[in-house]
Image (tube, coloured by chain):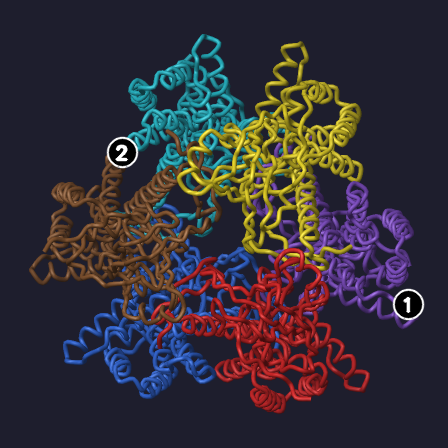
Chain colours: A brown, B blue, C red, D purple, E yellow, F cyan
Amino acid sequence: MKTKRKQVFVEDLKGGDIVDEMFMIADRIDRNTLILSDRSGRIKLVIPDEEGSDLIENLNVGEVILIKDGVVVGDPEEKYILLGEQSNIKKLDKSQVSVEDFVPSLAKEDIKKMMTEIRNYIGSVKNRYIRKLLEKIFEDRELITRFSNVPSSLNHHHNYLGGNLEHSLNVARICDALSRINDKLDRDLMIAGALLHDIGKALEYQPSHIIDKTDEGILSGHIVLGYKIIKEKIEELRSEGVDFPEDLEMKLLHMVLSHHGKHEWGSPQIPRFVEALALHYADYVDAHLKYHLQKVEEERKSGKTKWGFIWDNDMKKRKRFMLEG
Amino acid sequence: MKTKRKQVFVEDLKGGDIVDEMFMIADRIDRNTLILSDRSGRIKLVIPDEEGSDLIENLNVGEVILIKDGVVVGDPEEKYILLGEQSNIKKLDKSQVSVEDFVPSLAKEDIKKMMTEIRNYIGSVKNRYIRKLLEKIFEDRELITRFSNVPSSLNHHHNYLGGNLEHSLNVARICDALSRINDKLDRDLMIAGALLHDIGKALEYQPSHIIDKTDEGILSGHIVLGYKIIKEKIEELRSEGVDFPEDLEMKLLHMVLSHHGKHEWGSPQIPRFVEALALHYADYVDAHLKYHLQKVEEERKSGKTKWGFIWDNDMKKRKRFMLEG
Amino acid sequence: MKTKRKQVFVEDLKGGDIVDEMFMIADRIDRNTLILSDRSGRIKLVIPDEEGSDLIENLNVGEVILIKDGVVVGDPEEKYILLGEQSNIKKLDKSQVSVEDFVPSLAKEDIKKMMTEIRNYIGSVKNRYIRKLLEKIFEDRELITRFSNVPSSLNHHHNYLGGNLEHSLNVARICDALSRINDKLDRDLMIAGALLHDIGKALEYQPSHIIDKTDEGILSGHIVLGYKIIKEKIEELRSEGVDFPEDLEMKLLHMVLSHHGKHEWGSPQIPRFVEALALHYADYVDAHLKYHLQKVEEERKSGKTKWGFIWDNDMKKRKRFMLEG
Amino acid sequence: MKTKRKQVFVEDLKGGDIVDEMFMIADRIDRNTLILSDRSGRIKLVIPDEEGSDLIENLNVGEVILIKDGVVVGDPEEKYILLGEQSNIKKLDKSQVSVEDFVPSLAKEDIKKMMTEIRNYIGSVKNRYIRKLLEKIFEDRELITRFSNVPSSLNHHHNYLGGNLEHSLNVARICDALSRINDKLDRDLMIAGALLHDIGKALEYQPSHIIDKTDEGILSGHIVLGYKIIKEKIEELRSEGVDFPEDLEMKLLHMVLSHHGKHEWGSPQIPRFVEALALHYADYVDAHLKYHLQKVEEERKSGKTKWGFIWDNDMKKRKRFMLEG
Amino acid sequence: MKTKRKQVFVEDLKGGDIVDEMFMIADRIDRNTLILSDRSGRIKLVIPDEEGSDLIENLNVGEVILIKDGVVVGDPEEKYILLGEQSNIKKLDKSQVSVEDFVPSLAKEDIKKMMTEIRNYIGSVKNRYIRKLLEKIFEDRELITRFSNVPSSLNHHHNYLGGNLEHSLNVARICDALSRINDKLDRDLMIAGALLHDIGKALEYQPSHIIDKTDEGILSGHIVLGYKIIKEKIEELRSEGVDFPEDLEMKLLHMVLSHHGKHEWGSPQIPRFVEALALHYADYVDAHLKYHLQKVEEERKSGKTKWGFIWDNDMKKRKRFMLEG
Amino acid sequence: MKTKRKQVFVEDLKGGDIVDEMFMIADRIDRNTLILSDRSGRIKLVIPDEEGSDLIENLNVGEVILIKDGVVVGDPEEKYILLGEQSNIKKLDKSQVSVEDFVPSLAKEDIKKMMTEIRNYIGSVKNRYIRKLLEKIFEDRELITRFSNVPSSLNHHHNYLGGNLEHSLNVARICDALSRINDKLDRDLMIAGALLHDIGKALEYQPSHIIDKTDEGILSGHIVLGYKIIKEKIEELRSEGVDFPEDLEMKLLHMVLSHHGKHEWGSPQIPRFVEALALHYADYVDAHLKYHLQKVEEERKSGKTKWGFIWDNDMKKRKRFMLEG
């Protein structure tokens, strides 16, 4: 059966438009309000009193619905879709639709290319224990499918499907460069740290193509989940006869546990050897540069030219930022 | 063979004294300087140039030595033991000495009494999964022996052997009281959280009766080590046929991961349900009250009467604190 | 004369409803806008241009009005009541209405039960000076009526009439428990500190059944007002021949002055003896637990099920918080 | 009986000197160590083992002693006086000595001149209630004698007898200037706030010519003690028939309660009207300028020429500061 | 040609009004929205879909437009002007209008009076190098015209044309007073520092009578731009034969570079001599007092009487502030 | 004339040694104490009372002296050289000695190699204005000699002669790598920013081979001095007919002004375009990695093996750090 593709996207909607289109349910606000989304953005759906609760009751976050005869209300503050008496909502089976219409995500070929580059990095690792561990992990198809199809964050940077993969690869590139510039850094540790530091995000985020966290993700966090995954994989290796050194295990686990760098940034450990420190910096630099590049892009799209405003989390206020160049 | 007992303790030493006594090695500063300790305190040992390195080379932290003919130098700033030409150092086997002479520690009977109270708390838990898990963990003799013979911190509070046990029990008492005062709190979760929140300290601290951390303790920390222990024990239960609920597992693990309350206090998670929050408060209150009570005691011992000075970690300075009453 | 009771509450209003109901005036925004409230919540009242200023001129915060023929406008962002040409506002005398319809408040019987428990705590105090002081203060009917009919805060925790009493009692329960668990704590000081630490709120909040502060409350604050009240009561005792000890006076006053624990939390003093410190912790724990329990309740009421969002004042952002269990 | 005057001061002592001189006891460290002081500085007194405790037992902080045959030990780190077998300590009656030899203090004539300027400021106040209150307070000889003979701080700024008076006057001068520059500021409130903001220091510091705090000073602090004094004086005025306005009372008390400006600086209130804010700034500016001027002077005395180092409390480290000019 | 004057100002507009009036363009939000302003405030202009982009394309910030037949929409949250099909926008030449109608600004005579007072301060400087430098700078008509026609900040304090001049003069008055009260302060340095500390704002803000920054202002900031201006002027003096001392140059430049006082307030230098410190305080006090006085005025205008709310930047929240008195 | 070379270095001195050796004067503490240094470390020189002041009077920081018959005192806390009656101090002319004996510094060949790599980077710049500016600056021999012979900091990282050059080059390497990894970054801007960001240190540090700051360095700082140098060089280019674009000038100056990244780190500007941000990160990463690598080296030298302690400036305390690997 052929999948249906979206024709009209959220960013195209204007006040007065009649809506006959598919959307994903991104959030449930209350009995009369849902947040809908597609890959271009989000829009509120308002269902007038009384009718709301029944219609909404069996709609869940992550499901795709087809709206008939909704109206876009052109409130200058914020557009929303209003359901009238004639309007209609129908739940669709996900097999009928194309996920990439609904969630911002990297193209399949890009993901493939990145995986190839990652495999090259793994192949370049000289320490055989580290290389075996990386191979073990990247051969686990279910794990790696999740790893390469989750975002890197909910709304900070790389917040699209595949973002986690892209970020992990970029950190590996920076770590590679830093270990070439500074010969005191052990390149094998750096590459392993880069490829594994966010492996826990495979379990932290929903596998369901909606950008949200799992319960385990909220309660344990990707850092501890990464610790868990690596520990399990090392145990597997050992059960297969590999004498994985305990010191190396402690160092790799520490790199995952300390990659956020500071306690106040949610790091259970601060980095306690130079490679752990360098990994933290590589992670920090890639995340923050990407955040600014994404925001510059968004400001430009909204029609601004020379100067935009970007939220600065350190200063807790928006800062002027140059969009040109 | 009868064990030898110490006659003279660090706190008794005066300038000019000749030292013929046993000490534990608490730290190695450099080629000419060791820190010695016994249960009453610490004192520096200075070995004059040249001779230092050889003598010290095969002495390790945690070993007990017998010093012959050392001299106490009565520097007004800080006393230290000086080794002269006639002086002598001899390494002793630990089986010949009494550990309690060298490390501040709770009395054996106190530890026993506390273990009984803990078992009563376990017995009072109604949720059978939680009770089974607690029993499983507290039946692991090797683990619990370490758990009840480590300190709670290096130098903040409960910093003596058995301190971890005393603190864990006190947190259970406070959790018990809070869940009686506030009926919205699930007492079973509170008791389990209290008894398990610092279980990871069993692996974080040296089992060797010297108050210091293990490599794994430094690199992973007691919070993540606690997570690891509990996860393993739940897997064991499951392998024995117990259908331990996943939700409950996540909640218990979260309580351990969040018990430091704030990221800046080294907590990988902030508490995300009320029992986790209440456990954090119980832990915080017991640790801080004990810290102040210990410091008041120390100030009194040093001869002060009405007012002493206690370091306040929030204000990053010493504060006047009343010693009376 | 029989008092009129409200039939329809703010939380029931829906877009399009015609309003014939009583509300209390909670705030005056500008010449055309009032904030109305009843015990279920708040709603804006908009009076179209021109007519606004005259109608509003002699309406004051805390007064009760009857609105005839207002219309609820169902703005998806925020509902409000709009006054049309036919609409009408009439000021009511407070004797005609039931205060509990307008302000969230504890039930009379609950307040009574709590007062009994407080009197039991007073009776259990062994130090005769402390007991006399507590009796003196809790016999002052005017003071205690205000004390037990004010909220504990404007919008943080226990923000309903009677909240101050409930919180003070809960702090006493925790102090009682802490002094049983830790025998170094003087229980009499702890109980007195608990019952008196927020006595100044009797003067900080309006006695008029509207949840707001008095001028003195804004300019001096409940901590200093508590100091003033206790100082006066001790002077009264002395004028009646009681030789109230100066040291004890200083300690009790200090407990009030330091119960916020840290300067940055508005505490003119930091706690300088263990009971003052323990009182601060008891206050802190009860306030923060209650805040979370209230917010969990509010999130559930708004229709959320597993996860809600609660503002975290430390992190200055909303955190996910579990609503189940 | 003629008082004895000091011949040799702490700042003159050199290694090897034999000491036959009077000192005040500034602090008791432990059984073998006292801190001695005179107006030029402080020096440690070390009494060798055994003999220490007896000799020291009945010596208290604030008392003056005569040392015979002590020896100055010229430790490069820090000089101290060592008591030998021949040495001797004799307690002196304070009537035999000159207080100004022992505590840094302003000259009597300077204090007189300042009191005259203060009286002129009081005379210039136009609001008769404020003027009466100021007269009432400055006529209380006991209070004002203490007020003008205490320091402004233990070791931050104006830390000499009379410092509180000098600082209060300077704040009045700045407040006077600010209210002339900015006509929105009520000059009467500003002058009263300036003269009264530190009145509580009269009770916070020891009257005994030793620079230390009283118990009440430690437990209540000068801000709350100032509130107490002013409140009592207004009550006195009322009992004498003056109808002191309540609003004015609240404003004056608020100025005292808020003059530290921020909660984290120990202020129970933040300033809530412009004169309270301006008073805080005047206090802040005078205290900080004086601190730097005093430290510049000290650095110069120690022999530095162009650049010195001054502790910066904001940055929590020493900063280079220019001594010239 | 006679200039047209505005008849109706933003603050007068009411829902339903038909707008035929001139406004300045204060900001461009997106293709359908502009922010208009006049000296009384700001209002949004909404141009319905499709037509927006064309109309707006060649309208730039700072230009004046005449709107025909716009309608004021009386949204209770926020009024805005809606352009209908009949509506019309026409760009006006600035020579046809009166700038003071569009931007809040000081009166011409006030600016004149202030300049006279500034010249008196310059005349009172005794050091001939400092006086020459001040004369050189204040004779540069183009520079000083900009200096005295820019605001002191975008929206904090003195945010109107001429605000920079008023603030600079006020700082000079405070510096003058401080140097009279404290004779350790070099008055010439203080006066020069006051008059020059914000000279860089002449280049930081737009000369075009719109309150916004220049690109150089955003990228270099007024502190560094002030450094640049003074450096150039000293070089000019030297090229004219004046032997301006290097030490004095360094001190004056340092006063400009350090006048924000702390790094976190954007100061590249912290003050390193007492006059630099005193200048920082004078700047701080005037800016903060003015901020509060302006906000009090705004709260009163909005109809509040006794208490208003003012944003407190230190506490990152609104504080109650008294409007009376 | 042949230069004399040092035979014995500070790190070799032991208690009891007789000293006949040359040292540089690193600091003057007081009338009896100097700090001496050579490339291996620092040691105190104590000159007994009386004689001190005369001897020291005409010795200045940065001068080299020859000590005859000093004695090393082996205080366990800290060694120092004591001058006796026979001892002697003689000032040497710098032409007689080898600077590299006294100050830690890079080898001449290393500096040469680095300069070659820098010239290659300059040659690779494509934008002709940027390349010309870099050539102009790096052709100024006096400037570049200072630039490549100063340290990068007093005691944080790269604190040896040549450290500034090494750090600047390393930042260029990282910037080069980042611009290859991320094609949105303009490589020319990145290379220029890297090579120029610390050009101001040429004027901030003493040219005299003693590691200290100049007066201008203390009062203006290297950031503003870098701004000054680049501005002058661009003016020179313009005076030679190069039409250097104003926009490019502003961007390059901004990169220098913002490279410390945050106001609290002394940055007058925060980065306002992506290349400025990336430059800040490159600077930050190299400085912090080097700091840790240097400290690891120092800890190892002091004889520690697995774990050392390194001061962590964020946490304001020492952290355990692994020395192996």
Q: Bin the neighbour count of mark 1 within 10 Å (Cα to Cα): few under 14, some 14-19, many 20 and up.
A: some
Vertical position of residue A272 compared to residue F298: above or below: below
Work out which quarter of the rendered image holds the C terminus of chain A and state it. Answer: top left
Q: Amino acid at mark 2?
A: Ile
The answer to whether residue F291 is visible is: no
Q: Bin the neighbour count of mark 2 within 10 Å (Cα to Cα): few under 14, some 14-19, many 20 and up.
A: some
Q: Chain of mark 1?
A: D
In depth, the one of D112 and A224 nearer the eye is A224
Q: Position of residue D180 (x, y in %)?
A: 81, 42
- Residue at 64% from the left image edge and 71% from the top image edge: B306
* Mark sitting on residue B259: none
Q: Chain of mark 2?
A: A
- Residue at 57% from the left image edge and 87% from the top image edge: C114
Looking at the rendered structure, the secondary structure element under dot 1 is: loop
Quickly name the residue at label 1: D242
Q: Quadrant of residue D63?
A: bottom right
Quickly name the residue at label 2: A181
Vertical position of residue B140 compared to residue F323: above or below: below
Q: Quadrant of residue C320?
A: bottom left
Q: Amino acid at mark 1?
A: Val
| Residue B200 horizontal side relative to residue E303, left or right | left
Looking at the rendered structure, the secondary structure element under dot 2 is: helix
- Residue at 61% from the left image edge and 70% from the top image edge: B322
Q: Position of residue B105 (x, y in %)?
A: 39, 74
In depth, the one of E70 and E64 nearer the eye is E70
